[in-house]
Amino acid sequence: MTGATTPARTPDLLGHPKGLVFLFGTEMWERFSYYGMRALLTLYMVKYLLQPGNREQVAGFGLLQGALEAVFGPLDVQPLASQIYGLYTALVYLTPVLGGLIADRWLGRRRTVVAGALLMALGHFMMAFENLFLLALLTLILGNGAFKPNISTQVGMLYAPGDARRDRAYSIFYVGINLGAFLAPLVCGTLGERVGWHWGFGAAGVGMLVATAIYLAGAGALPDDRPARRDPAEASRAKPARHKLTRDDWRSIGALAILCVFVTFFWATYEQQGNTIALWADGYTDRGVNLLFWRGDVPTTWFQSLNPFMIFAFTPFLVAYWAQQARRGTEPSTLVKMSLGCLGIALGNLVMIAAALEAGATGKASPMWLFAYFAIVTLGELYLSPTGLSFVSKIAPASLVSMLMGFWFLTNFAGNFLSGWLGGFWSTMEKPHFFAMIAAIAGAASAAIFIFDRIMKSRPSRSGAW
């Protein structure tokens, strides 16, 4: 066994392999669990866990606070919560490098996905116990590292090389991600804010168990991915063939490494949604509703559903638009799409400058500013995130695809860590200045990716990947 994989030979369903349905469902419920917990995390820490008298109950908290303050100086409740949020969401995207390596070399993708799913379910249930807060975060980080790169690469493995359906499959898969992310704040967020924090975290754990069940039910429709040397007897008879990386392979790896630097700044600005944008919705947005069937404030976490809702609302129109551009020969390259994605984040934060000016004059800003922000940022995300996943699956050498997919997720690691640091300025900066800073960072990343595309196009590879 050489460790090579082939597309699963299963009947097509609606023009795509049947396995895509199971991967769609698995990822939908996994994202339900992740975004359900994420919608509550900053609010939970700021409003409850990090308040004096509560933080002392968390095992190891003093050590973590001391380490963070040794680097960033004294931290009040909000900056401390922002740093913990950034550290957690960063490490969630660091461990996929290890998870991809484990799958490629030892366990295979299926076993690694199942192990990761069970670890994440355990971590969500541990969040219900305050003293286990940091251990729960660590368990979730390790579980996500095993799960994330290997579920994403299996989408690409359903299709033969050159299959034009692959890009569309990743867009469909991305809808699954965001369907779960849309439901999560409505269910987990409402339970957490209105019933009790731990109810929200528990609901996230149930969602992860559902994801595991769906994945196991669809195992027969997924590609076989037994890793090299899994059978000791076979390995003793012959060593698997190793494919030497070509010049184009190394060029692709190097280009991905450079691109990762630019994309890091996309995630640093995008991830303010679950951090400072959540605090904006809670403290600076008029959430009051006065209708016949509802009087009172809309839960803060509900605003976190706007982005995923808009993703699956906008995706069909955007895919159709790209198809129309392709027929005319005007569809942007992958890198130009990613440049436009960063530009969307910049424009969304320019909208929030106007919101901040209104709030400064009246005390509260209209929720319509947040609707506009999420609409623009969502379009930016659709131009960057799914196209990035597809891009990695297309140009990565076959023997390194899972590991490089994990490497791609390092952009989320660095971006989320930077996001937490940037979020620490929220309580000390004027809000228009804060949003202008975020817009400037995203705008600079947009320009850098566009210039990089021009450079790569001037030096085409033999494979035609660029």
Image (cartoon, rainbow, N blue to C red):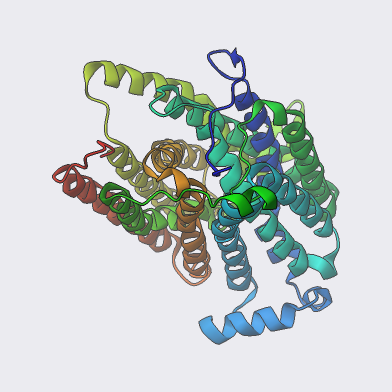
Front residue of this view, candidates 90 and 252 = 252
Q: Position of residue 420 (x, y in %)?
A: 53, 65
Q: Quadrant of the C terminus?
A: top left
Q: For residue 53, which quarter of the picture?
A: bottom right
Q: Is residue 144 visible?
A: yes
Question: Is 444 situated above or below 328?
Answer: below
For residue 458, side relative to residue 339 (left or right): left
Front residue of this view, candidates 274 and 87 = 87
Q: For residue 333, which quarter of the picture?
A: top left
Q: Name the residue at the left extreme.
A: 458
For residue 273, side relative to residue 193 (left or right): left
Q: Quadrant of the N terminus?
A: top right
Q: How many marks?
A: 0
Q: Position of residue 278 (x, y in %)?
A: 59, 53
Residue at point 76%, 39% (across, down): 212
Front residue of this view, candidates 332 and 231 = 231
Residue at point 52%, 33% (across, down): 157
Residue at point 60%, 36% (across, down): 177
For residue 302, side relative to residue 321 (left or right): right
Q: Is residue 310 visible?
A: no
Residue at point 77%, 27% (across, down): 293
Q: Position of residue 138 (x, y in %)?
A: 71, 65
For residue 307, side relative to residue 318 (left or right): right
Front residue of this view, candidates 36 and 136 = 136
Q: Position of residue 460 (x, y in %)?
A: 18, 42
